Image (spheres, rainbow, N blue to C red):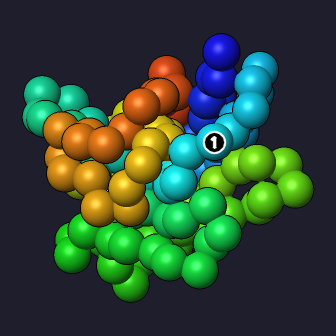
Amino acid sequence: QVSLIESGGGLVQAGGSLRLSCTVAGGYFNDYAMAWFRQAPGKERKFVASISWHGAMQYYADAFEGRFTISRDKPTVSTSLQLNSLKTEDTAVYYCADGNTIYPDDVGYGMTSWGKGTLVTVSA
């Protein structure tokens, strides 16, 4: 069974950057897209960005385009999310998912597997 493993979270000051990674392990990756979501404390999960298997197509939620960049590393069957100009409101658990669409909604429509998340904490 495919499992997704996120890494790269941590504590960073506002204005700083982090790079999150997600690796697929334990099986054959046969879905079309990978995506990142986040869930802030006390709030619902939100879609952040997605990318197609071949990496040619990326899609961002409006709130994150320009500050966050998603990429693929096909040799290692993984995806990364570069977080720049971080704000305190970016504090959240960031989740990696894979599925059959690069246009998921906040609920995660079309996503079939999820990681356990990595915590990003942005201090003032």
Between 64 and 102, the one lying in front of the other is: 102
Q: Is mark 1 on a helix, strand or loop?
A: loop
- Which residue sits at x=64%, y=29%? 5
Q: Residue 90, percent across and down?
A: 31, 53
Q: In which quarter of the image is residue 38?
A: top left
Give the residue at the far bottom of this rendering.
66
Q: In this view, does 75 lie to the left or right of 78?
A: right
For the C terminus, the quadrant is bottom left
Give the residue at the far top of this rendering.
1
The residue that disc 1 covers is 30
Give, as a three-letter code, the residue at label 1. Answer: Asn
Evaluate whether residue 13 shows in this view.
Answer: no
Between 19 and 1, the one lying in front of the other is: 1
Evaluate whether residue 89 shows in this view.
Answer: yes
Q: Residue 9, percent across and down?
A: 57, 40
Q: In this view, does 42 lie to the left or right of 5?
A: left
Q: Residue 82, percent across and down?
A: 57, 65
What is the crowding at mark 1: few (fewer than 14 residues within 10 Å), some, or many (at least 20)? few
